[in-house]
Image (cartoon, rainbow, N blue to C red):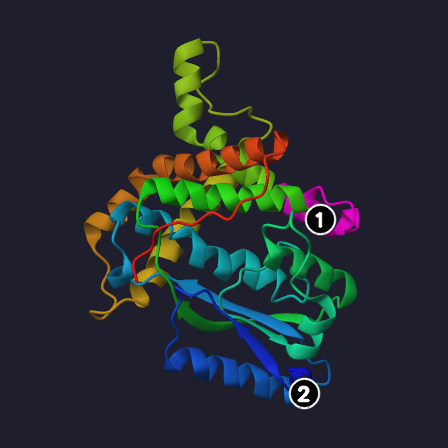
Amino acid sequence: MEGDVRDDIWVLHMDDDTAVGPDTAISIVKFINEQRRSEWPKHLAQGVLTYPRENATNWLTWMADSIRPADDLSRFAALTGGGTPISGLHGELLVIRSTIEAQIGWDFGPKAITEDAQLALIFCQRYPGRSDWFEGRCYGASPASVRDFIKQRERWAWGLLGLALNKTIPLRKRLFLGYCVSNWVIGPLQNVVFLLLVELILQVFSLSPVSPYVLVIWTMNMAFAVWQYWEGYKANVASSGGGGRRRPLELVCLIIFLPIFSLMEGLGGMRGFYRLATRKENEFVVIAKPV
């Protein structure tokens, strides 16, 4: 409605399979009230997407989705919370002023797949320093099967890689996004299990999984990945019923299954890259999730 396009009206974006709780509403109200008192008010903010255990129908995809709340608590908190969402946004628990949404819009043409990330890059260009992050949570559900998990990641990679190559957006605004997606697509090739298998097969590498010159960086990258899954798992358990108790066996499996999680992510990313490279026609991908 035209009368609803005002600076004091905010729009909350959620997926149809994502729920809110009293804590969600309290966090949003707190954020909006802070903008009324701020000398440099923000125009949009992103919260944390969590996956309660009771919403899961597939244990493996639920564990693999530990990465998502951890991404909110690290990358999105640092970048979107720092005022410039150059790594994109996700459509759950996104609050934005109606005036800003009306100016940017969501219709970026038939080739657009990841409209939320495209809105983020345009926002970076027009309103630098005006985004924020808040600790509020919403509650989603992981894909119902590994196949659906890979299809979901395929669509994301397809859209984000295309966005990273979109020349209508300044190069400096999409460079970091391109790096993040590329790192995601080749993720399985960086895993210690893959590197040790290559060494075993070729029998020409040293005992170090990577060159000594990049060993420190590689180790930090792997440590960060372990931390992300660990913290994301804790966030998902905390949002679950039953007092948010962690299960010791799951903590062990979380580490052991990291190569499998990486392969699931990487397969989706590679399939998305293939679709982009072969110029496949955009199509809406539907995956099964518990209701």
What residue appears at the point 41 percent right and 69 percent down from the top-left corner? 138
The region drawn magenta spans 164-179
Residue 170 inside the magenta-drawn segment: yes
Q: Is residue 88 left or right of residue 251?
A: right
Q: Is residue 265 left or right of residue 78?
A: left
Q: Is residue 278 left or right of residue 14?
A: right
Q: CA distance from mark 2 to mark 1?
A: 34 Å
Task: Indicate which disc residue 174 carries.
Answer: 1
Q: Which amino acid type is marked by label 2?
A: Gly
What residue appears at the point 39 percent right and 45 percent down from the top-left corner? 149
Q: Main secondary structure of the magenta part?
A: helix
Q: Is residue 27 above or below residue 277?
A: below
Whether tag 2 and tag 1 are in contact, CB under 8 A, the answer is: no
Q: Position of residue 110 (x, y in %)?
A: 65, 50
Question: 5 and 224: which one is in front?
Answer: 5
Q: Badge 1: few (under 14), some or many (20 or more) residues near its Cα, within 10 Å?
A: many
Task: Indicate which disc residue 7 carries.
Answer: none
Q: Is residue 266 above or below residue 203?
A: below
Question: 3 and 230: which one is in front?
Answer: 3
Q: Earlier in the sequence, mark 2 or mark 1?
A: 2
